Image (cartoon, rainbow, N blue to C red):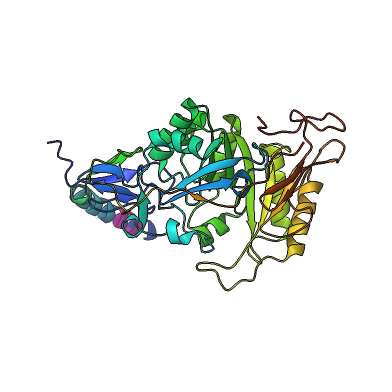
Amino acid sequence: MCGCDAMTLQCELCPKNCLIAPGQSGECRIRVNIDGRLVAVTYGRPCAVHVDPIEKKPLFHVLPGSTILSLATVGCNLHCKNCQNWEISQEDPENLPAKELPPGDIPGLARQYACQSVAYTYTEPVVFYEYTLDGCRQAHDAGLRTALVTAGYINREPFERLAPYVDAANIDLKSMSGAFYRDICEGSLAPVLSTLETAKAAGIWVEVTNLVIPTLNDSEAELRKLCQWVAANLGRETPLHFSRFHPAYRMKNLPPTPADTLDRAREIARAEGLYYVYIGNVTREDAENTYCSGCGALLIERQRYTIRENRLRDGACPSCGMKVHGIWT
Amino acid sequence: MDIARRTFTHMVLAAAAAVLCPVLRRARPAVRRVRYAERPHRGECRGVPAPLAPEETARPGAWIG
């Protein structure tokens, strides 16, 4: 015996660094201390298995018009009051249906449904880290692309270990305010910025999403600060998605984001020099189109999750020949 | 006078800490730091078993051009 039977564990996967007593789980609900062993109890047991348009992630500069096998298990290490997927992110794994899908079966399922890539999404792929890691390895070995849709709340070392197996990531940058992360999400800002920089440095294709919530993170000063940070630290070529808030979970007291606020956010981002700025969760004629950063020509025309027209030629603008950043083949 | 009182207070606190700390240390549970979780053994997975039937959401548009 190792004498670990009654040992408390400290999980060092994410910045929460939860102390987990025997029989208990971390804040994520799925990393459980079983007799002194830290066990990921949703490993190979996703609660959501969908075949989505890749535009739904959103990943606008990765294989446009393709489908992506999208997986999630229960659990999240943040507790955002506005969570859109709280039914699965903020629930105990015992209470929800779970399918049996070991990592080795993921590539076959993706091929069966004609998916060119696999995403770990909906909840938080950080908390089911081992499943994400093994799944990404298997998908890579099978020649598939891999993607994360994440809040980026993870310690640096585990993220660096995962990064070689990830092609693309849409990372939430919820706010540039530490107080927002503390009060709304029960997290902190610095680890998220670190993850964004680490992902970029590791060669992952990064797109950033900012959910614009009325009165909480929609001031011009904050939007400008966010755009400046993205341009300076991730590069002007990083696609930035401003997403419309809808009242949900514990934040039903605020109205949906006015479309004008999203237009203003996009103007600020463009003024700060970002090449590719999109507006999501709102029906606008040109909200999700891609334009050439050189000549301004319309390159990809989107309507919701549909590609109406794709004029890219070998990843470049057909008018001026300017290379468009992204993963196109 | 103030200096004498403060010094005396510090001495008392230091003595109390010297006495109590080993006790507190002994009372603290053992903690093992772990970064990566183990894959679950049979029977350790949690969730209500459900059939594997991927749900196809809205179809994306085909490539044009």
Name the foreground residue: A78 vs A186. Answer: A78
Q: Main secondary structure of the magenta part?
A: helix
For this orientation, the residue located farthest to the bottom is A253
The answer to whether residue A47 is left or right of residue A165 is left
The answer to whether residue A265 is left or right of residue A172 is right
Residue drawn 69% across the image and 39% down it: A238
Which corner quadrant of the image does residue A90 belong to?
bottom left
Which corner quadrant of the image does residue A259 belong to?
bottom right
Q: Position of residue A72 (x, y in %)?
A: 45, 48
Total numbered labels placed on residues in the image? 0
Q: Could one spot residue A158 in this view of the protein?
A: no
Residue drawn 52% across the image and 27% down it: A143
Write down the region rendered in magenta.
B5-10
Q: Position of residue A121 (x, y in %)?
A: 51, 47
Q: Is residue A49 a member of the stretch shown in magenta? A: no
Residue drawn 56% across the image and 52% down it: B57
For this orientation, the residue located farthest to the left is A1
Q: Could one spot residue A212 in this view of the protein?
A: yes
Q: Position of residue A152 (x, y in %)?
A: 52, 44
Name the foreground residue: A78 vs A124. Answer: A124
The answer to whether residue A92 is left or right of residue A270 is left
Name the foreground residue: A172 vs A278. Answer: A278
In the picture, the quarter occupied by the C terminus of chain B is: top right
Name the foreground residue: A195 vs A49. Answer: A49
Residue drawn 29% across the image and 56% down it: B8
Q: Is residue B9 a member of the stretch shown in magenta? A: yes
The answer to whether residue A20 is left or right of residue A124 is left
In the picture, the quarter occupied by the N terminus of chain B is: bottom left
